[in-house]
Amino acid sequence: MNAKLLVIFLLWSLPAFGQGFAGLGASGEGFAQPQRGTLFTFPKDHAAHPEFRIEWWYLTANLQDAQGRDYGVQWTLFRTALAPTTGAGWSDPQLWMGHAAVTTSQTHRSAERLARGGIGQAGVSGAPFEAFIDDWQMAGPDLSDLSVRANAPDFSYDLKLKSEGPLVFHGDQGYSQKSDRGQASYYYAQPGYCVDGVLIIDGEETDVHGQAWLDREWSSQPLAPDQLGWDWFSLHLEDGRKLMVFRLRHDGGGHYLSGSLISQDGQVTTLNHETIVMTPLQNTPAPSRWSLRLPDHGIDLKVTALNPDSWMDTFVRYWEGPVRAEGTHDARGYLEMTGY
């Protein structure tokens, strides 16, 4: 890790940690703000938006090998801006951070990369699509056909993804509100990938197949200052529908809930606090067992982590891992918990 780069991350991030998870509740003054009614333009909006303060390209995959053993894979590229501009070389104010992980029922392995914009070490382009940091890469002609790879000392993966449905737009046509005070992001997803590829764990190569979900989100103040973090689920239901729900936790209670129930043909039903019931089934920090109910839609699930100890050993620590659900439906998916 470049020592100068680590100092830059420390100087920028540490004063903000009290303002929501990892400073995401800090003021976005001077940066562009999401506006309701904005139309997305593709492939341009698959690329970076440096005028906004924070952005991510976030892939999770639920995989199995020939023996039916379960695996989870994460690949994420984050962009954070010190100022709403770009520049050449080290004067570029864009900071990049990559996270990769592989989870089994027994182990959770994670790795991290840091980069500074303007020196060719990381970036995203829309057509053809490429998101990369060092030799980690997510790339293809567009988001419907991707190759994803990452490596670390004790694991690596090389996956091929083919979409089986359209992009979906969360919230109000991609304008995703995050609090009653008006914090919001632009948020769309490709939740319907079919995956084939190879995992290598401690030198042992395994062929895998399964499903993947890609989230795209950008904003300048995605959390209110009193929001401590979030609990986020993405689930592939056995009947072909997809479900995304999140809970943004407020200091003192009164959490903000939102989500999307996605039909097989990509139609989105927007969910809110009146239609989502999320209840942790443990009193421990970052609970790995949950009750998730949508009474209006006949969905009542008990969700359990494949590996309860799926902490990301990264600069900003959080919980991220694959989950299974049982109840009115069987499902597989991912859970992310921050701010604990």
Image: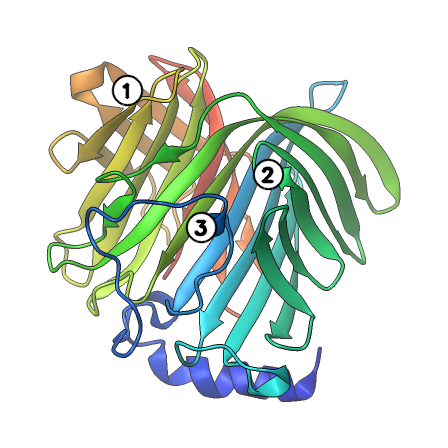
Q: Is residue 243 left or right of residue 305?
A: left
* Label disc, if present, on residue 45 of the rendered structure: 3
Q: Amino acid at mark 1?
A: Asp
Position of the N terminus by quadrant: bottom right
Would residue 283 appear left or right of 181 to someone viewing this image? right
Can you give x and y, in whole percent of width and height, for residue 184 in the image? 24, 55
x and y percent of residue 259 in the render?
27, 36
Q: Residues within 10 Å of mark 3 (few under 14, many from 20)?
A: few
Q: Residue type at mark 2?
A: Asp
Disc assigned to residue 142: 2
| CA–CA distance in space, label 1 to label 2 | 36 Å
> Which sits in the foreground, 72 or 99?
99
Residues at marks 1 and 3, CA–CA distance in whole angstroms: 35 Å
Viewer-proximal residue among 194 and 339: 194
Q: Residues within 10 Å of mark 1 (few under 14, many from 20)?
A: some
Q: Looking at the image, is 14 positioned above or below residue 105?
A: below
Answer left or right for 245 relative to 288: left
Question: In terms of sequence position, does the residue under pointer 1 or pointer 3 come before the other?
Answer: 3
Q: Nearer the viewer, residue 78 or 290?
A: 78
Q: Earlier in the sequence, mark 1 or mark 2?
A: 2
Is 27 situated above or below 264?
Answer: below
Kindly identify which residue carries mark 1. 300
Indicate the amino acid at tag 3. Answer: Asp
Residue 15 higher or lower than 228, as above or below? below
**Which residue is pictured at 56% across the width and 87% down the height?**
91
Q: Residue at x 25, y 78 (%)?
A: 29
Q: Quadrant of residue 60?
A: top right
x, y percent for residue 247: 26, 46
